């Protein structure tokens, strides 16, 4: 009986050590799962930020599109003003052929107006070009953000799979411990 008790005590100590090891493995697995869950949550939050930024970029693109329409309308109005001024000049030239000094002053003024209008048109055209370039930049950024969102979505799937594998490992280890405890 003493010999059997010694053998049983040795087996009991071995089983206790195994249980202790399995408990430690389960605790480590639980810590890993919590870290992975936090990483998954952080990734979800980052994806939401990227989606919000993409929406903002789309809003900005739409805003610049509207501003481009307004600038184009202003350019058309300036062109009409220049045409009207030129028509006025022509009409007055016909009437005021004899008054060349007065006509010369008026022509000079109209030329200055036309030059100013042309400068304004060039500035507006440059602003229009700059706006188009900015819209393209926003569109490129939106595409980049969408790519990043897809990338994080794939990483989330991988993390979820790793979590499931760890959970299965913990369940198997617990079943092993229970089976050994039954024995």
Image: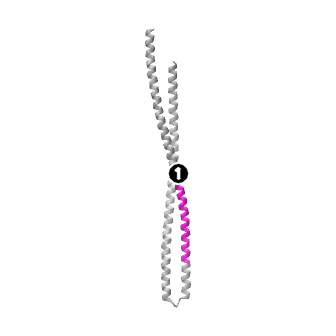
Let me know if residue 57 is in the magenta part: yes
Give how far across and how far down residue 40 sits, in percent: 50, 41
In the depicted structure, whether residue 32 falls above or below residue 1: below
Look at the image and tell me in which quarter the N terminus lies: top left
In the depicted structure, whether residue 128 falls above or below residue 91: above
Q: How is the image coloured?
A: one colour
Q: Residue at image x 52%, y 27%?
A: 172
Q: Nearer the viewer, residue 165 or 59?
A: 59
Give the mark count.
1
Q: Residue at image x 48%, y 67%?
A: 126
Give how far across and how far down residue 12 sits, in percent: 45, 17
Check the image and name the residue furthest to the bottom. Answer: 98
Give how far across and how far down residue 49 sits, in percent: 50, 49
Residue occupied by mark 1:
52
* Dominant SS in magenta: helix
In the depicted structure, whether residue 8 falls above or below residue 104: above
Give how far across and how far down residue 69 sits, in percent: 56, 65
Q: Nearer the viewer, residue 75 or 150?
A: 75
Let me know if residue 94 is in the magenta part: no
Residue range corresponding to the magenta coloring: 55-83
Q: Is the residue marked by circle 1 packed among few (<14), some (14-19), or many (20+) residues within 10 Å?
A: few
| Helix, strand or loop under label 1 | helix
Check the image and name the residue furthest to the top. Answer: 1
Q: Residue at image x 50%, y 42%?
A: 41
């Amino acid at each position: 009986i003493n010999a059997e008790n010694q053998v049983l005590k040795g087996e009991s100590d071995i089983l206790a050590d195994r249980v202790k090891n399995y408990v430690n493995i389960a605790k480590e697995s639980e810590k890993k799962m919590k870290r992975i869950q936090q990483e998954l949550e952080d990734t979800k939050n980052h994806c939401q930020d990227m989606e919000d930024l993409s929406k903002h970029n789309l809003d900005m693109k739409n805003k610049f599109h509207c501003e481009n329409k307004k600038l184009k309308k202003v350019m058309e109005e300036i062109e009409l003003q220049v045409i009207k001024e030129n028509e006025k000049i022509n009409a007055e030239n016909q009437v005021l052929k004899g008054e060349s000094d007065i006509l010369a002053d008026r022509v000079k003024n109209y030329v200055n107006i036309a030059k100013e209008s042309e400068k304004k048109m060039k500035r507006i055209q440059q602003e229009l070009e700059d706006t188009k370039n900015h819209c393209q930049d926003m569109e490129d950024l939106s595409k980049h953000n969408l790519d990043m969102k897809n990338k994080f979505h794939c990483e989330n799937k991988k993390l979820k799979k790793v979590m499931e594998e760890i959970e299965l490992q913990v369940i198997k280890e617990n079943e092993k411990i229970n089976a050994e405890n039954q024995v």
